[in-house]
Image: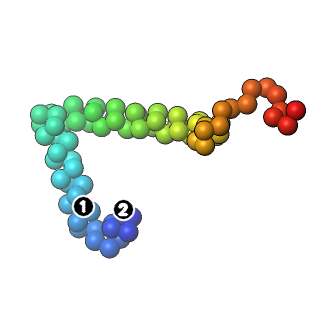
Amino acid sequence: MLDNLASDPQSESERLDIAADQAIAACGGDLRSTVRALILANEFLEYELCEMFKAVTNGRSRGRQSRTGTDWFD
């Protein structure tokens, strides 16, 4: 996406304008509802990212279960 932005900034701007228009239309033209919906979507994505980060740091991304209290070499 950053490559597209650097190579053709006008089309990226147009894409964002279209996405904004679609979000506003989905909320019936109410800008306040649109902003609230986008904030909610962003919070959901942040939550999902935190959950993924926790899963990766606990080793669950490769199917391993987290260790509980004992060293697995014992």
Identity of the residue drawn at 30% across and 37% down: 38
Residue pushed farthest bottom? 7
Q: Relative to residue 46, is residue 15 depicted above or below?
A: below
Mark 1 and mark 2: Cα distance apart in space? 12 Å
Q: Which mark is residue 13?
A: 1
Q: Position of residue 23 (x, y in %)?
A: 20, 42
Amino acid at circle 1: Ser
Figure label count: 2
Quadrant of the drawing holding the N terminus: bottom left
Residue pushed farthest top? 69
Callout 1 crowding tier (Cα within 10 Å): few <14, some 14–19, many ≥20: few
The answer to whether 15 appears left or right of 44 in the picture is: left
9 or 74: nearer the viewer = 74
Quadrant of the drawing holding the C terminus: top right
Quadrant location of residue 11?
Answer: bottom left
38 or 69: nearer the viewer = 69
Of badges 1 and 2, the one in the foreground is 2
The image's colour scheme reads rainbow
Q: Position of residue 33 (x, y in %)?
A: 21, 31
Q: Position of residue 15 (x, y in %)?
A: 22, 58
Amino acid at circle 2: Met
The answer to whether 71 appears left or right of 49 in the picture is: right
Q: Which mark is residue 1?
A: 2
Identity of the residue drawn at 21% across and 47% down: 20
Q: Earlier in the sequence, mark 1 or mark 2?
A: 2
Q: Are marks 1 and 2 in contact (CB under 8 Å)?
A: no
Identity of the residue drawn at 60% across and 38% down: 63
Quadrant location of residue 56?
Answer: top right
Callout 2 crowding tier (Cα within 10 Å): few <14, some 14–19, many ≥20: few
